[in-house]
Each structure stands twice: as C-alpha cells, then as structure tokens.
Amino acid sequence: MNRSLMVGVLLLLGWFTVAGQGQAQSLDELHKLALKEGGTLNFYATLAQINAEIILPIFEKRFPGIKVNHVDATSDKLVARAVSEARGGKTLGDVFQVPLENIIQLQEQGLILDVALPESSAYPDGLKGAFWTASDLQYFVAAWNTGLVKKEEEPKSFDDFLHARWKGRLIAEPRDLEMLLAFAKYRFKSDEKAIDYWRKIAAHNVEFHKGHSQLAELLVAGQAAACLTCYSHHYPLRMKKGAPVNMMLSEGVASINGTAVFKNAPHPNTALLFARWVASETGQKVMAQGGRNPAHPKVDPIDKTKTDKTYFITVADLKEFPKYEKIWKEIFKLR
Amino acid sequence: MSTIAIPKTAKERSGFDPALLVPVVGAGVLIYLAVLPLFMLFLGSFQAEVAPREFVYTLKNYQNAYASEHTYSTFVNSLIFATGSSLLTFFLGTMLAWLTERTNTPLSTLFVPIAVVPLILPGVLESIAWIFLLSPKFGYVNVWLMNIFGLSSPPFNVFSLPGMIWVHSVGQVPLAFLMMTAAFKSMDPSLEESAMMSGANTWQTFKRVTLRLLAPTAGSVLLILFVRTLESFETPALIGIPARIYVYTSEIFLAFNEYPPDYGRGGALAVGLLILSAIGVWLYTRATKEGKKFQTVTGKAFRPRQFDLGPWKWVGFAFLMVYFLFVVLLPFLVLFWASFLPFFAKPSWDALSKLSLDNYRYLGTFRPFWQAMQNSILLATLTATVAMVLTSLVAWIVYKSKLRGAWVLDFLAFVPITIPGIVMGMSLILLYVAFPIPIYGTIWVLLIAYVTRFIPYGMRASSGSILQIHSELEEAAAASGASWWETFKRVTLPLLRPGFVAGWIYICIVSFREFSTSVLLATGESRVLSILLFTMFEQGQVTIVAAIGILMIVTLLAVVGIFYKLTGRVGIQT
C-alpha cells in the first residue's frame, strides 16, 4: 500500500516536473527547438514596414539563426490569404498578428491554436484570451493639419467637431465602426445619442479613405483639415519630422491588436518562441521602440500616444460588430 | 503473295522518332503553363464552400457574380474605362506617330525616343505620380491652377473615372505610338501622291487616303488597347479602389482579398473577363489578317512622303512640347521631388528647405527594399531567359520542322495573351497552394507566372527571326552529320541572336514592372519591387515610395541602356 502510494506520489511529482518544465521552458530552450525546425518564422502581420524594420531585426539578433519572413498586408488581405491556403490544405503561417477581430475570424475557421503563454499572466483579463495575447493597442484619435486649422479652432473634445466650421473638411476610415460602438457603449452609454452624434458628423460630408497610414499621409498633405478616426501612433514620427499635424489626446477609442499561433504551423516552436517573446516585457519594450503602443501593463509607449480618457473596445464588444457595422454604413452611406 | 523485305531504319523499327520528342515536350510544357491554370480556375468557379474547406459544385457563383446589385455598375465602369482609355491612348499615340513620322513638324525626330520613355515607368508608379499631381486637394497641378487663376475648387480630380482613364492612357501611349509609327512607316506613298496629283489638298489627302489606308491597323490597335485596359489592374487598384470605382479586375481582386474570400464569385468574374479578352484578341487577329488585304505594305523600296503642314507645323510642335513636358516629364519630376521630402508637402519655400537625402539613406539599410530589388532583378533576367529559350524552340518547331499539327504549338503559345494578369495570379494560387512541390509563396511560382504571361511576346520576337533563317543553312549542317540539337545550338541559335536579344530585353522590362499577377502571388520573401511600392504606398510611406520608384527607374534605365548598346535601336514588338 505504502509502496503504491510512493509510486503514485513519485509519478505525480514526475508529472509536475515535466509539466512544469513545459510551462516554464525558457526562451533559450525554445530557441534550440526552433533552430531544429529550420530557422524560419512565417509572420503574417499587419505591422507596417517602418515598425517591422526596427522590431524584427532585434528579435533575429536575440535569437540567432531565426529569420523572420514577414508577410505583410492589410488585415483583411491576410485573413483572406490564410483562408486560401487552408483551402488548399496548407498552413504556411506560423504567427498571426492582426487586430483582434481578424484573429477571431481565423479562429472561427478553425485555423488558430489554443495556447496560453506563460508571459500572458502579466496581462489583465481583457488583454488575453484562450488563443491570443494582446501585442499592442491602437488609439483612434482626432488629428488635424496645423496649416489648415487655426489655433483657436483646435478641437478639445469630439463634441467640437459638431461645429459647422468642419463641414467638408473631415476625413475618416470607412471601416472604423469601432468609433460608433465605443461612443454608444462607453461615451454616451446610449445607442440613440451615439447614432445622433455620428449622423450630425455625416452631415459634414466626411470624405472616406481606406487605410489609417494613408489617412495620416493625406492629412499631412492637406487633403483635409482634420481626421476623425486616425491612429495616434502614426503621428509622433511625422511631427518630429516637422509635418504640419497635431492630435487630440483628451479622449479616444482603443482597440486591441493580438498575437496568435496557427494551428498546424509549419514551425510550431519558432511560432511559440516569437509569440512568447513579443508578449514578454522585453518584447513589448521592443514594440514600443518600433513605434507601437505596447499592451503590457508595465511598458509605456515611447511617445505620448495614449489618450487621457479611453473607451476600450472589449472582447465581448466584438460580437456586436455586425450590428454597429450596419448602422455605421447606413449613417455614412458606405457600401 | 510475296513481299520484299526492306531493311528498316532504327526509327522505323521502334516506331519512335527522337526528334518528335521535342514538339511533344514543348506542347506538354505549354499545356502545363497556359492551360492547366485556366482549367483550375474554371473548376474553382463552379465550387462553393459550404463549411470551412467543404465544397460542392454549383452554378450559384455565376449568379452571385453576374446578377448582383454591383454587376451593372462594374460592367458600365469597365466599359467606360476601357473605351475611354483606348480612344484617348489611340488619339495621343496616333498624333505623336503622325507628327513625328509623316510631317515636317520642327525637331520631330527628337521626340521619337522621348515618346517611348514612359514605357519604363511601371504602372504602379505612373498612378502614384498622377495622384501626386492631380489629387483634388494637394495635387500639384490643382494647387498651381487654383493659385494662378484664383479658383475656388480644384479643376481636376484623379479619383474619378476620367482620372482613371487619363492615368491609364498616358501609360499606354508609347504602345499605340510604336504600333502607329510602324503603320505610318510601311504605308505606300504612291497612293497619297496620286491623290495630290489629282488635285486634293493636304487635308483632303489625309482624310480620304491616309486615314482610310490606316483604318484596318487603327481598328486592330484600338482593339488591343481596349483589351489591355480591361485586363489592367494598376490604375483600378491605386485610383479606382480608393475612389470606390470598381471594374472587373478590382472586383476579382476584392473577391479574393476581403473576408470571407469568395473564390467562386472571383472565379466566375475571372472566367467572364477571360472570355471578353479572348473575344477581343480573336477579333484583333482577324483584323490584322484582314489588314493584309489592303496592301499597305509592299515590297517596294520607298520612304513615305512628308506632309507639309505650313504654319500649322508650329501647332504640331506645340502639341509635342506640351506632351513632352506635361505627360512625360512631369510624372518623373514629381516623383523625383517627392523622393527628397520627409513627408508629402505642397510645393513651397518651406518644403524646399526640408529636402534631404534621408529617404535614400533610409533605403540603404532597409532590408525589404534590397530583398525586393534582388527578387525583381533575378526574376526579370530568369523570366527573359527561360521565355526566350522556350519560344525559340517552339518557333523553330512551328516554322521549320514541317511537322503536321505544329500550329497547335503556335496556338498554345498564343493563349496566355488572353489571360489577364490578375486572373493568372488567381489561377496559380488555386493550382499551387495544394501542389505537392512547395513552391507557393516563393519566387518560383512568380517565375512560372511571368514566363507564362510573356511567352506570346517571346514568340513574336523568336518567330520574326526564325522566319528569316533560310533552311539551307540548317540542312547543310544536318548533311554534315550534325544532330538536331547540334544544328539548333550551332546554326539556328546564333542566327537567332538579334531577335533573341531584343525579345530578352523587352521581357526583362515587362517582368521588372509586373504588378497585376504579382499582387496575388508575391509575399514576404518573394516580394518584388512593384509590390513593395504598393504595400508601402498603402502604409502611407509615400516619399519613401517615391525614392524606391526613382531607384527602380534608374535600374530600368540601365537595362534600356544595355538594350541600346546591344541592338542600337528602340523597337518593341507587340
């Protein structure tokens, strides 16, 4: 009896040790396993080239022998690509780093691995899930061209944009229904008031352009006086170069970019290595260095890009995207 | 009955002629390259995904593609885009060709090489340059015109159908120019002279004789321009999609690139576009055959006479100058200027003080740029080599081998001309994603795509020179005991060299510029320059894009420089 108990205890201990090792496996141990997979990481990510160009070489330097193949495109194109590949019976991507709603799309297609990274324990509940961890946050803010907006006209809050002087002077991104959703749920706490606000904005004849980076560039060039749905992290670099732009950080909407690992990834350990590294405090500092807003609670962005009052889009909100997308498109008569 | 036994040759004994292997292999390669992807596309257009990765066969895709609320507007947009663009291109190209070839317009010969220069400007860059110039709020041309004339609103908006037509047309003008120049050059002047002698004035002669002689060529040039516009994707992607003006190619692209991707609908649209362009190409080949009946080209030695435009020659000169300054030079200048800016800015003293070499310095250490450059150069040279070797062989079989059924090869080598780039990209994804050899996502799949697309160009160059080689030379080699391969290598190939070089360089240029196929196939490590331009433009790095563009043009100019050196002429076969 005693002996069998001993064996049981030993087995349990052994199991704990093995399991413990699996969890607390160091990044360097993972690196060794990754090298055996050939040393390539297929990184499907929306990360802009100018950010990737700083972030990825640091990863490659930290883990010699690993080369990142960055497949970059807009998020919908990346989702479409992964779905096409799956259609042909292939998984070619290792890591998927895109806005959370796009990760969920691929998860619904059965292409994302359920994995809890040890590093994600440092993140609050809203910034991690069963198959993803936040990689960075993006803040939707209002920004303006300082050559076209007088000092006294500069907006202090989103309410200021209701003024008639903004008619025909605004640009926005056609897919940013997050603005409507966040205003409805967190700013006004009323669908009606939020819809009313955006209808009044729509009456200003907002001009729509796809892609937030392009919006920023258009604003710099003077295509419009102000942008209603721009990303705050696009501005510090441009402002440092002397571009005639500024942004409003008093209030804004935040949404999550996440990192996930492909199910049946061709380089599973390499994928895990990158996902864990980018979620770690070190990796998050590198993300900040590359010009992004880190999601890790202990890491701050390098430039001031966080808004004072922030309306966070939560994971639960994502389910309501279709509802608000429909209203958003109706308000602005978008296809 | 008795028979006399005749000793059989080795060939007869085995019933197998090794020389037959070449055409069979050739046909096999062509079928593999040109027909198989189309078969996959056709198959895919009847498949619908009922659950993730579960397919059924259905006609619904065609219903979705051709009976939706967008069908009509896409059709109308495509039609307006292709008609408007082919007419404008034809008008500009013909004017340039006529003024430089057939009139006494001052300095007109200087304009001949200039008119061809835009050919090296990749379509993506052409579109970007015109966005810089004609954007409603910040486009330089608009800003200048508004300042000079005190206008309250911008006179031009590139983000419109007329804008798309303009941008696409100016990129295509060199093609129309070259084709029309060839037509003007080969025109028998005696007909015009007879008209003049019968008392017709310049205008009457032009209208009643010149124009009528040109009509068949004009018809076929218009047709080919129409088809090329329908197939093009650069302008629809960079100007059409942001302006929400969709044509067939952009609808196909979006069907593939929006979530959830709709292959069935994309495939059905692609099949439609393929049929349209096949009809266009078929009409074109018929028209060019008909054209021969009009005997505009004769064996006589002649030099077409020049029209004396009188004082109007200065109008002609002004037209050429305006064209040169505003259509050829301005896009280059705006890219050059933007490449030194830290961010896109209106022309001003302030902007002038911000000019620097920063973008070029940045590119010096920007890894994706060097990788894309390497891929583009490798692909351009490999594509040109493979396509020219392949088409030299095929052209030899078609024109020299006297094999029955050799025309099948000629036909197969012509098929790719009907396949729009975006359709080719889509077909190859369907084919290679599931392919046992893992070339999907690598530059090898791009190589296959490029070779397939440019085989028809290679055939033009190869067959032209093959036809000029007299069979006696090859027969002499064969009689001296040379094997088929030796004859081909030591006699035929060296004689083919001039055509080979011309074709090689042309294919090199078009591969280097290629966009509409690469946009679906090139990613990550296989990214080529045109795609890097497109993604970085989408990511808002417009001034870095301008710098990449300038470096791309410089690289292409180097290729064209070699072209000049090796062949001593500008001559593009279409």
Image (cartoon, rainbow, N blue to C red):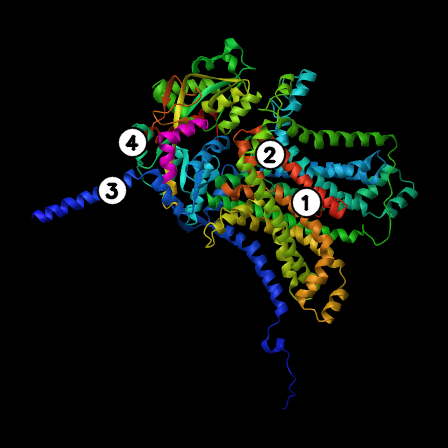
Q: Position of A187 compared to B257: left or right?
A: left
- Looking at the rendered structure, whether the residues under marks 3 and 1 are on a common chain is answered as no
Q: Is residue A104 visible?
A: no
- Pick whichever, B517 or B448, lies toward us: B448
State whether discs 2 and 4 lie on one chain: no
Q: Which mark is residue B223?
A: 1
Give the percent coordinates (x, y) of residue A278: 38, 33
Q: How far separated are the C-alphas under marks 2 and 3? A: 51 Å
Badge 1 sits on which subunit? Answer: B
Q: Secondary structure at mark 3?
A: helix
Q: Disc 4 versus disc 1: distance between alpha carbons?
A: 65 Å
The residue that mark 2 highlights is B548
The numbered disc on residue A19 is 3
Q: Chain of mark 2?
A: B
Q: Which residues are magenta?
A: A272-291
- Asked if marks 3 and 1 touch (Cβ < 8 Å), the reply is no
Query: Along the polypeptide, which appears first: circle 2 or circle 1?
Result: 1
Q: Between residues B377 and A263, which one lies in front from this camera angle?
A: B377
Provide residue B419's location: percent of width, then percent of height.
Answer: 59, 48
What is the spatial separation of the Cα atoms under label 4 and label 3, in whole angstroms? 17 Å
Q: Residues within 10 Å of mark 3 (few under 14, many from 20)?
A: few
- Viewer-nearest of labels 4 and 1? 4
Q: Residue type at mark 1: give it.
A: Leu
Quadrant assignment, res B237: top right
Amino acid, disc 4 = Ser
Image: B109 above or below A173: below
In this view, the residue farthest toward the bottom is: B1
Q: What kind of residue is marked 3?
A: Ala
